[in-house]
Image (spheres, helix red, strand yellow):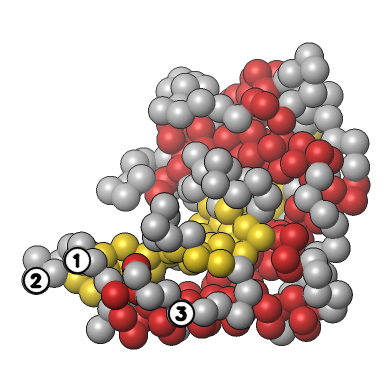
Amino acid sequence: MNNWELLSHEFNYDLKNVLLQQYLAAQVIALAGRYLIPKKPDGSNINMQYIPEKEMLLGNSHPDGWAVGVHLKNFSVQVLDEKEIVKAKISLEGKTFQEVFQEFKTALQNLGINVSQLKTEQPYELPTGGLKEGKYFAIESDDAVSENIRYRHNAQLLISELAARFSDVEPVRIWPHHFDTGTFATVARVEKGGASKTIGLGLAIPDSMVPEPYFYLSFWSENPLEIENEPVKLPAGKWMMPNWNGSILGVSDIIQKQTTKEQYILVRDFFKTGIDNLVEKMK
């Protein structure tokens, strides 16, 4: 079952609050990637991955070998060396984002890292809505922390498993502006090499479309696909067309299943049925 961990909580205020604080903490990784790591053509210098065995969001490595992570269990920003040994640790609890950023900047300076270019500006608004009154980090529920960790754990392992069926696929990563765990596969390319048909899959955080964390399967084609009018029946979740080209499966549906095996099969089959249908329609 790919080490699926049982989800058991209705999505509520505590879960949302922890998720939003993790979202904001992850921006420290993104800022280091944006201003201190050489820019990559696809902009992936700002993204990160989830490391299940470490319960950590981990950014890209600097050419000198160091990287920045956010440990979700003890809620801290960490600077790691090329051997992933922690060289600096900044606790988040009870601090504002600006306080954390300044401590982070000082920690990098103490490690001999040039931070003259590092700043907090992003081309999108920082998600400070999850902070407490007074605008500081504060985790009040260990259960909510653990459930959010299970979201990331399950998504990382299952999305990686599903991605392996594609030959032309991006690494499973978390992008800081929308904070989902996801990837996309290119199913077809035009003669010059650009993508003409793609499939996206991942776990998204609540947004204007769905008010809870949800697994998603999306697609894009430069030419209309038959599936846009006749989607296959899914074993769980639902298609969102015509408003959005894809399907979703919310955590509220997943927790109706009471064992790890049942939950894993439900989510796996949601993806498998949709992917099989999309691949067939894209031939």
Q: Nearer the viewer, mark 2 or mark 3?
A: 3
Give the farthest residue toward the top: 134
Q: Where is residue 283 in the image (x, y as percent from the top left)?
A: 25, 84
- Comparing 121 with 206, the one in front is 206
Q: Mark 1 points at which residue?
A: 223
Q: Nearer the viewer, mark 2 or mark 1?
A: 1
Label 2 crowd bin: few (<14), some (14–19), many (20+), radius 10 Å: few
Instruction: Please report contact status of discs 2 and 1: CB closer than 8 Å, yes or no.
Output: no
Among the 4 quarters of the image, the one containing residue 202: bottom right
Left/right of residue 185 with respect to residue 67 in the rendered view? left
| Depicted 181 relative to depicted 159: above or below | above
C-alpha distance separating marks 2 and 3: 30 Å
Task: Give the residue drawn at x 65%, y 26%.
Answer: 128
Q: Name the residue under label 3.
A: 232
Among the 4 quarters of the image, the one containing residue 100: top right
- Comparing 117 with 277, the one in front is 277
Q: Quadrant of the N terminus?
A: bottom right
Q: Position of residue 208 (x, y in %)?
A: 55, 41
Task: Give the residue drawn at x 9%, y 71%.
Answer: 191
- Sequence-wise first label, 2 or 3: 2
Q: Where is residue 282 in the image (x, y as percent from the top left)?
A: 28, 78
C-alpha distance separating marks 3 and 1: 19 Å
Q: What residue type is labelled 1?
A: Asn
SS class, disc 2: loop
